Image (tube, rainbow, N blue to C red):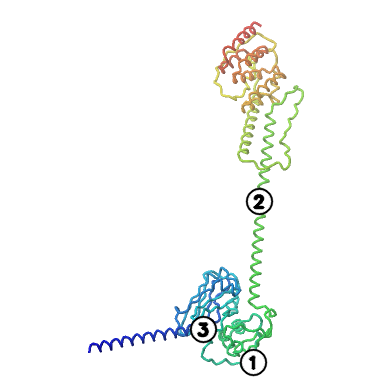
Amino acid sequence: MKSSLAAVEGAGRMARGVFCKSVIAASLLACSTLASALGLGEITLHSALNQPLNAEIQLLETGGLSNEDVVARLASPEAFAKAGIERVFFLNDLRFTPVLRGDRGVIRVVSTKPVTEPYQSFLVQLARPNGDLLHEYTVLLDPATSPQGLAATRSRNTQRSTASAQESRMPVAPPAAVQGKHYTVANGDTLNGIASRLQGLGNKVSASQLADGIRLLNPQAFAAGAGSALKVGQDLLLPDSAILPSAAAPAASPEASSPKPAELQRTAEQLSAAAIENQQLAQSLEALKAQTQELQEQMSGKDKQITALRSDLAVAQSAARPATPAAPAITPATPAQPAADPTPGTDSFLSLPILLAAVLIVLLLVAFAYSRRRQQRKQSAAPAVAPDEQLIKPAQATMLPVFEVPAVAPQPVVQPPPTPAATKPPAAQRSAGSTPDALDGVSIYIAYGRFTEAMGILRSALEKQPERDDIRIRLLELLAEQGDGRGFVREEQSALEHGVDPQTIQDIRDRFPQIKAAEVAPVAAVVPAAAVA
C-alpha cells in the first residue's frame, strides 16, 4: 500500500514538472514571436534649434511587451561607418528610453545639450531575438519662431535583411477624398513634411491624422511600410481635409515657392539685430574717439607744463651762471638760453622722480634769486656809511650763510695807517652788485659740492677784478673749509698785500681750526711787516 502511494506521488511530481516546463516553453515562444515582430516607425520632433533634443520614435507591434523587453540604443561606430554616416560627438549625448502604454509604444530620444546644427542624422539599434534592427533617422530642426520648427524630416530604413515581419494592424477606413485633391512628390519630401504643409491654418485635423489619411489613401506608395521613402514624381491622393496652397501648384518645387511668412519674419529679425549691432558699434566708436581726444588734450597740457618748467629752469640757470664782468660802461651780453627753443619732437613724458627733482631745483633757484634781490634792495636803500665804517669790507655784509658756522663775537675795529688800498673808493665793488656776481655762481657750486670749480671761478674773478676784497675773503674761507693750509697761506699773503684786514683773516682761522699750526708761522711773520709799512 505504501509503495503504491509513493508511486502515485512520484507520478504526480513528474506530471507537475512536465506541465511547468511546457508553460515556460510556451511563454518563451510567445515572447520570441512578439519580439520578432517589433519594429521602428516615424520620428516626431518636439524641440527646435538651439534647444535640447526631444523626439519620439514610434514602436510597431508592441503587444504584450514591457519597458524592460525593449532595448534601444545608438548604433556602434562600425555600423555608422558601414552606413556611410558620420558619427559626430554630439550623438554621444543622446538617451533612448522605451515608453509602452498598452498597444502603443514610443522610444523617447532626448539630449542634455542644445542642438546647434540644424541637420542631424543618426542610427538607432533595436535589439530583437531574430537579429538587431538598424534604422536611420534624419531630422531638420528649424528655429523656435518657425512653425516648421517641430516638424520631422525624412527617415530611411537601413536594415539589410528582408526578414522583418509585416505590419499587422486592424483595418481602418480611409478618410473621404471626394474632392480629388492630389499632390506630386518632390525631392526631399517626407510623409510628415507633406502633412505639415497641407494642414494649413485653423485646420482641426492634426498633422498626424493627415499623414495617416494619406497613407491609407495611397497604399501603393507605402507598400514597404510606413517608414518607406517616397519616390520623386509620385502622385498622391489627398484627403478632403487637406488644404492645398493657393499661391503655387502642388507639383511646384520648394525652391520656386514664394517666401514663407516665417522666413520673412526671420529675415526681419536678422535685419533688426544687424541694425542694433551697427548702432552699438557706432556708439562704441564715438566713445573711443572721445577718449582719444581727451587723452590728446591731456598730453598737450602736460607738454605745455613741461615746456614751461624747462623755460623757468633755463631762466634760473642763466641767472645763476657766473658771467665774466666787463667794464662798468659796457652792458654785459645776455647769456644764451639753450633750453629756450626746444627742438620739435623732443618733448616727451618725464618720469616722476626727474620731474620732482626739476621742480625742486627751480624752487631753490627762485628762492635764491629772491633772497639776492632783497639784499640788493637793502644795500641800495641803506644810508651812506661814515668814513670809520668803510673799513668793514662789503664781503662781510653780503656773504651768504651757505654753511653753518659758530657765531663770532664782534671784534674792535683796528684802524691801520692809511694805505693806498684803504683810500681806494669802493665804487667798483658796489657796481659789481648790479650785474651777475661771481659769488652767486660760487654759492651754487658749493651747494652741489663742486669745490674745485668754485675756487677756479674765484681765482678767475680775482685776475679780472683784483680790487675785490670780498672775493679774496670768500676764497680764504673756502680754502679753510677744505683744510688746504698751503693754499690758505699763499692766498693770505696776497690778501694782506692787497690791504685785507688782518683781523678778518684771523677770524677765519678761529672759525676753521683745521688749519695746521705749522702753516700759521709764515702768516705771523707777514702780519708785523704789514703793520710796519
Q: Secondary structure at mark 3?
A: strand
- Tell me how far mark 1 sits from mark 3, CA to CA: 31 Å
Q: Secondary structure at mark 1?
A: loop
Residue at the image position 63 percent from the left and 39 percent from the top: 355
Amino acid type shown at disc 1: Gly
| Left or right of 438 in this view: 132 | left
288 versus 167 height, above or below: above
Q: Earlier in the sequence, mark 1 or mark 3?
A: 3
Looking at the image, the residue that sits furthest to the left is 1
State the residue in front, 169 or 191.
169
**Dot label at residue 294:** 2
How far from the left and from the top, in percent, is residue 212? 56, 87
How far from the left and from the top, in percent, is residue 21? 38, 84
Residue 327 in which image quadrant: top right
Mark 2 burial class by Cα count in 10 Å: few <14, some 14-19, many 20+ = few
State the residue in front, 63 or 435.
63
| Left or right of 232 in this view: 170 | left
Q: Earlier in the sequence, mark 1 or mark 2?
A: 1
How far from the left and from the top, in percent, is residue 268? 65, 72
Amino acid type shown at disc 2: Glu
Residue 431 in which image quadrant: top right
Looking at the image, the residue that sits furthest to the right is 330
* Residue to which mark 1 is pinned: 180
Amino acid type shown at disc 3: Leu
Q: Earlier in the sequence, mark 2 or mark 3?
A: 3
**Dot label at residue 60:** 3
Residue at the image position 69 percent from the left and 42 percent from the top: 347
